[in-house]
Amino acid sequence: MDAPTGSPPLRSLVATFLGIGLASFGGPAGQIAVMHRVLVDERKWLDEARFLHALNYCMLLPGPEAQQLACYAGWLLRGQLGGVIAGALFVLPGALAMWLLCCAYVHWHGSAVVEALGYGLKAAVIAVVAAALVRVARRALTSRWRWLLAAAAFVALALLALPFPVVIALAAAFGALVPMSAVERPPALPAAPGERRRLARRTAATAAVWLALWLAPLAVLAWTLGPEHVLSAQSWFFSRAAIVTFGGAYAVLPYVADHAVAAAWLTPSEMVDGLGLAETTPGPLVLVLEFVGFLGAARHAGWTPLLAGSAGAAVACWATFMPSYLWIFAGAPWIERTRGMPRLANALGGVTAAVVGVIAHLAWWFALHVLFARHDVLAVGALTIEVPAWSTFDPYAAAIALAAGAALIRWRVALGWVLAASVAAGATIWWLTGTG
């Protein structure tokens, strides 16, 4: 498939996507806007229709949609080599920035300065997730069925403690069986039987190559270190997470947090710190998984903390971002055919609605662990209810969270300014009151 205006020189492709990677702050919406401005408006390498068509496909996939869009655009412009370069350069600046932040976090963790700076950041994270919840809900909850499915997803996670992949699978099945919106079937693309067979063989070969590139290094790691080693456990866990991350980083974080806390890779408070740090770096928000991998390996690998943490960060990034190449390079040739499958579109609509409930659960989880120093777990039949100890409520953190939420949702203040103000306010309160 050729680009609308021809293939750009490789040097220009590298410089352009490196610039996009360095400028991609503000979550998926901001990152996609940057790509649209550069690739469509300025460079004119892609036209509007092709860019939106690629975006629609990437939104149906598990994993970081903005990185997949970069990979898809690179594939359109320069084939698989272009896709590899574009996808890697989109992630690399943020991954390096997060690695430096992880090193600093582990080295100075527990110091008064880090605690003071992190106090306001944790509170701001609640507002960031709440703003994402409002934004996604406005777009996704367009019918009564979708509202009910979002509520059911919240109950399944918060009260029934169902595993995240099960919730996503049930939402997809429900959407396929109970269509929540009409889906127009576009005309089918004509294709000769021989052409379909050639495409199927090429797709199978492509999938086999990228599946091996994704999983073979992780298998060698597990064989070398043993299946019980923390890096082996992380490699398979992050690979599983990569398959079920429909809805972006906010949707998968409860799943990752539950497992990481249970495995003692990090604490709930540190999970909130990781999300706050990821919000300050360019690139996809799912780079928070690099933070999880770094801390877990630094504490359990048995090596020096920075070496072990760096290995854990590398494993997390590899397992998280390599699958994107598989989804794009194997799936892109069939995109037009998936557009003609209303049942698939309805199933994915069910997942989109459930993601709202998943993000609501994430907001509740963060609020519980940031605003209360202690909480209890009550079992009522099949229900498991986390109840905060109201005597440990932190009014200062709540005030910062409310102010940050109002700034993001009501006045649409830029995220960077909100985070900076929250950190400054939190540090001031921390030093004046000894909170924390």
Image (cartoon, helix red, strand yellow):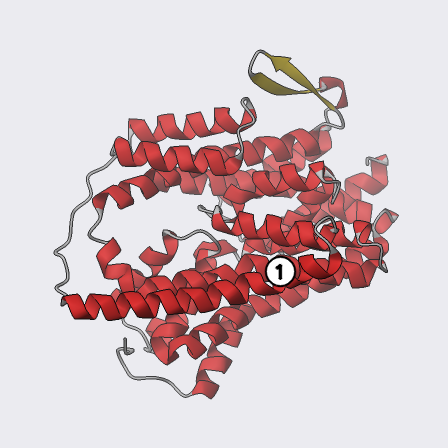
Residues packed near mark 1 inside 10 Å, few (<14), some (14 to 19) or many (20 plus): many
Q: Inspect this view and state whether residue 19 appears.
A: yes
The residue at the point 49 percent across, 43 percent down is 132
Q: In which image quadrant can residue 160 be found?
A: top right
Closer to the camera in the image, 217 or 333:
217
Residue that label 1 marks? 218
The residue at the point 58 percent across, 30 percent down is 364
Q: In which image quadrant can residue 254 be found?
A: top right
**What x and y, as percent, mark residue 162?**
53, 29
Closer to the camera in the image, 118 or 399:
118
**What x and y, as percent, mark residue 385?**
61, 19
Q: In which image quadrant can residue 267 be found?
A: top right
**What x and y, as percent, mark residue 28?**
47, 55
Judged left or right of residue 39, residue 421 is right
Closer to the camera in the image, 14 or 29:
14
**From the image, which quarter does the C terminus lie in?**
top right
**Residue furthest top as drawn:** 381
